Every structure is written in C-alpha cells, then in structure tokens.
Image (cartoon, rainbow, N blue to C red):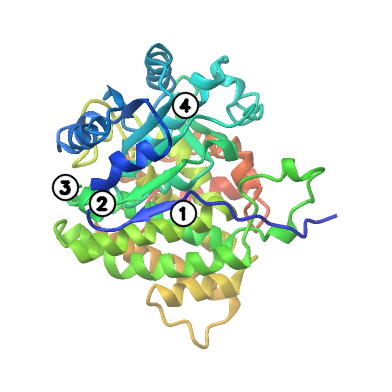
Amino acid sequence: MNDTVFTMRSTPYKFGVGATEEIGDDVASLGLKRVLVVTDAGVKATGLPERATALIRGKKIEVGVFQDVSVEPTGSSVQAAIEFASSFAPDGYVAIGGGSVMDTAKIMNLYGTYPAPFLTYVNAPLGEARPVPGPLKPIICLPTTAGTSSENTAIAVVDMTELRVKTGISHHHLRATLGILDPLNSLTVPPMVTACSGADVLTHAIESYTALAFNEREKPASAAERPPYQGANPISDIWCEKAIKLVREFLPMAVKDGKDIEARTQMMLATIYAGMGFANAGVHLPHAMGYPIAGNVRGFHPPNYPQKKPLVPHGMSTALGAPASFRFTAYARPERHKQIAEWMGVNTRGSGADLAGQALREAFIGFMQNIGLPNGLQAVGYTSNDIPVLTEGTLKQRRLLGLSPQPVTQKAVEKMIEESLVVW
C-alpha cells in the first residue's frame, strides 16, 4: 500500500541584512548559559565568529569556541570535534560557516548528547542507522554560504575516508533550532565557493522537484517511521520552482561580483526555498553520485578552497553527474524535466517527451559553463578506470537511490558516470 500522507518540517528562520546583530538576543531567548561556537579557520579569518561571540557574551552567557572544522568533514575530523564538545559540555551550539561547519556541529550535538560508537547513527549499509534517541540541545546556525541549507535539513554528511565514500546521519532531531540568514555574511565568499554552493542549491531544487512522489512510496508501518525525505509533494514543488528561477538569475551575478548585495540576498532566499523543498522531498541521483565523486578524490585542488588536501567540493561533485542523471530520470518524469528546462531558459515548446532529458541536460550544462564549473569528471582527476569504484559508491546510497523516479541499476549508473567523464 502506498503512502497518502506527507509532512512539512522546517527550521524557524530569521532573514535579512544585519540579522546577525540579534544573535545575543536569540541565544538568550533559548535560556542558554554555556554555548559552544563552531566554525572553521577560513570563516574565523573574516572576524564574524569573533563578533558573534562578543554579542553572545554581552548577554552574560559563557562561550567556548571550536574553530578546527574540516572543509568536507571526515570521520576523524568529526571524532575530534565530538571529543572537544564532550569536554566542554555546552547546553547549546552556534554554528557559523558553510555546510561543513553546520553538519559538524549537528554531529557534535548528537554524540555529545547521546554518546555511542560513531557508526551507531550512520545510515545503512555503512552504519547501523539507529534512530536518534530523543531531542538534542538547541543549535543556532548562521550560514556564510548560499548553498547547503544544512540549517534546515535533518541530515549531516561525513566523508568516510577509509571507505572512500561519503555518507550521513539522517533524523528529524538533527534539524537546527534557528537559522539566521544574513546576506552580509556571504559577501566575502570567493567565486568558486559561491559557484559550488549555488550549484548545490540548484541540484537540491531540481532533484526534489523530479523525485519519486510521496504517494508512490510504500506506506510506513507507523508515522514515526516516515523518513525525513518523503518524495516530491505539492508544497515542496512550489519552493523548488522559486529556487530554480532565483538561482538561474542571481548566481552568475554573485559569482561575478561577490559584493553585489542584491544577488547575495536573492541567493540566500533561494537557499531557504530550496531547503524547504529538499529537506522534506529529498534528493536522488546527482547527490548519490556526488558522494563517491567527492570521496575518491586523489589530486584535485579547486581554486578558492583550502589547499591542505585534495577536494571536490560538495556542490561541484553533485553538479558533475547532474546532466547525465537528469537525462536518465526524464524517462519517468518528462513533463517535469521539460518544465525545469523552461525555467532555466531553454525553449521546449513543440518538443516531445523523449527530448525532455536532453533539454534539461543542455540547460544545466550551459549553466555550469556560465558559473565556471569544471567540464566533467576528467577535469577533477578521474578516468574510465574509476567507473567501477564510483559505481560501487553510488549504489551504496540506498536512501537516495530510493527517491529516483526511474529505477536504478548498476548498468545505468555505469553509463551515467561514463557520460559524466566529459560533460560538454
């Protein structure tokens, strides 16, 4: 029996230029007395964490700072973060940064509140996928990038380096208590980081709009077992449409001129819209492919990112496989794929359903070129010899593959990865 119900959950938002100035009041309103601010070295250098910390301390609240978050967190980096959180024992968290910072703070909160071996809560088949036992401590997120929507998601992603694949923890208790989105906090984000973060917004929205519908999923045995990612639904559809249109118009402007406050403001709004959509509907193939693309990187160092380790940023990794993915999923949802292509500026009038996937593929490729993303997997260091390992890593993402509107086979994944080696 298929499901007939979907739920809509969202982090409460505070949005607007200068919203950061109210962080002290926001923390105090939660009754917190001992707060841990979580950030990374790059964000710390902007002075934002120091300013936020001063505002919180101005409310007579004790503050500790953890500033060693790893870009694209790994199992070892989050273990170190968990140990720090456990020793500091805060009664709440403030995450200041991009998705890596917010996801790390979520994981610190989870394991600091309910200690357990790390794989306990990690998604199957890599982990045990045990449910989070109960509510976590309050956590406020101040994103500095317009991209991940991690402040509104019920997931935290981590790179299991020993397995050479990314995975995550998924439970509605991980969702933040408050998201403060201040466009001023994104003005210092460099062009490639802006492009990758914005590409993540776009893939979130497209994947959610084209996902298996909520009423095509099997009905759960109980309401508590309904997953955070429930499939496309009428409410998420509205948010996704708005996000796609905003990203198409304003991301190229933000990449070109990072000080463009209007572009930064509209991209922050797009982040909220896409987050509202995908945090409830979910994502599918581009993200499933993106995890092993990021996890198996060998020698690629993208511009504008820390050069300490090889890295394929999350938004880039999902975008590289997206054109082939959307051509594949269009067979199951041709009208939706055609509609997205239209929103992205491709005239599809008069074209049949069989051309829907090609239309969206071309629209997405044109956008990748416009914002300066690499031309396929070969440009980030992969060859045809890597198809088996990337296929294996993709097939491990069962939670995401289950949302593909088109049934996924090993052969199909192999073909999509081969098509993604050189995209245009």
List the residue tagged with mark 3. 188
Task: Point out which mark residue 109 bears.
Answer: 4
Decide: is 368 above or below 394. Answer: below
Task: Point out which mark residue 275 bears.
Answer: 1
Quick one: label 2 or label 1, which is nearer the N terminus? 2
What residue do we see at 60% from left, 56% from top? 8
Q: Name the element at disc 1.
A: helix
**In the picture provided, is 108 more to the left or to the right than 327?**
left
- Three-letter code, disc 4: Asn
User: Are the residues at dot 3 and dot 2 in contact (C-beta closer than 8 Å)?
Assistant: no
Disc 3: CA contacts within 10 A as few (<14), some (14-19) or many (>=20): some
Viewer-proximal residue among 287 and 377: 287
Viewer-proximal residue among 97 and 376: 97
Question: Label 2 vs label 1: CA separation?
Answer: 17 Å
List the residue tagged with mark 2. 194
Residue reaching furthest right? 1
